[in-house]
Amino acid sequence: MGANRSITTRRRVLAGLLASSLAGCTSVSNTGTDPASATTTRARTEAVVDVGDFLDATNWKAVSGTVERSDATAFRDDGSIRLACGHSDNRVSSVYRLPRPLDLRTHHLSFAFDYGAGSVGRGPTVFVQAPDTDNMLVYDPSHDTRNGWVQVPLASPTRVVGDPDLGRVQALTFSQWTGGGVDEELHVDALELVPRSMEPTVVFTFDDGRASVFDHAVPVLNQYDYQASTAVIPGRETNASFLSINQLGTLHGRGWDVMSHPQRTEALPTFGDAEQASLIESSKQWLLDRGFEDGSRFIVYPYSRWNRSTLELAAEHHELAFAGGGVSTLTPPMPMLVPRMRGDDPEQVTAAVDRLSTYGGVLVLMYHAINEEYIEPAAFRSVVSHVHETPDVQVRSVGQWYDEMTDSTT
């Protein structure tokens, strides 16, 4: 739906969100003077449900370490909450007590975080008390956190404690395990609630363009008329272990996205800005030259590694980029950092799909190959079958998800 809308039009739909997230990433105050940022602020205000005075430190209680308001750094321009602990603590942890119960039956949470320079963390654990510590949704977003502010969606949880009542969320705990012996500093900001998507969604993605995907994944997905997406490495198409141009054309004809994956032996952040730009641009051009314009809107960062330059350069050429772990909301708060989950463990994936059915969100699964090294063909078949049989869960390619997402925001 909306397939006739131009790429340029769709870029404008998320331009404000992207501009705001990149400005926040760099801890630059958003004054609202940029037209795209101003548009984002208006749209966000209309979508946000009241979460109380999140930046009032008197609404917080330190469990381990200290908690205070900080005006020195912020994802936006109104300060942040600083959680800190010293060598004698094994974690930094504080609770935000909500002024009134929140209803997560109709909304998902998102928030932004940043670590201090000495941090060893990869993302704080968030405990959503519904209504107490015996009944919680637990989230473990994973990102390379040495690159400044990251805004993450909290859709379907990583695990569930007890029997949470989604209509009675009373408090949120933000916690980072250190093990002791280090100083830890965690800033949190931009706590928001955004509307749920209508249906829980699974997106199958395959990195590198391996030939085993054509042999073992495609027939299974075809059985259910599911489309998927593969991120290909330019130049590998002549290698028998990877998808040929003819095979990629066949997948494209079936509605698959052929996405960008500028893979080298080193991750993108190891290169200077000019070399990163060249790699990102040439990988997209390779797709355009071979007729894969739709999929060229999307990029997968090699090794899931990035820095601020990577985000900004990718945003010049792409609509969505994939890195980090977790489950997305319908519209990811940072389009250049869309989370995914590795799909090689069938039990882990089926449990995640079951949670998705209950709590909603967009689960992007990532595979490299369908073989004995990664996931056996029979195991992959069982995962797809489980997705098909799980109530209310739909399957979309990256492009289908993106087109529906942008249609829903206009």
Image (tube, grey):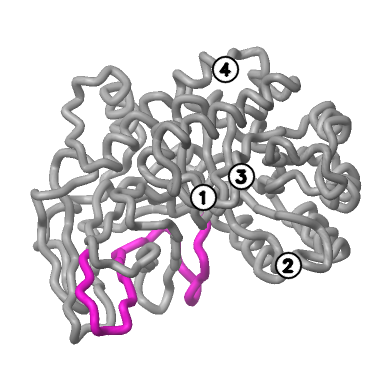
Regarding mark 4 in the picture, which secondary structure is present there?
helix
**Camera-nearest label, 2 or 1:** 1
Please, what is the three-letter code of the amino acid marked with disc 4? Ile
Left or right position of 86 against 123? left
Which label's residue is closer to the chain start, 3 or 4?
A: 4
Number of numbered discs visible in the structure rendering: 4
- Identify residue for label 1: 267
Crowding around mark 2 (Cα neighbors within 10 Å: few <14, some 14 to 19, many 20+) is some
Judge whether residue 184 is colored magenta: yes
- Identify residue for label 4: 7
- Identify residue for label 3: 263
Q: Distance between the Cα atoms at labels 3 and 4?
A: 24 Å
Q: On residue 346, which mark appears?
A: 2
Residue 275, above or below 35: below
Regarding mark 1 in the picture, which secondary structure is present there?
loop
Quick check: can you spot residue 252?
yes
Please, what is the three-letter code of the amino acid marked with disc 2? Pro
**Which is more toward the observer, 214 or 68?**
214
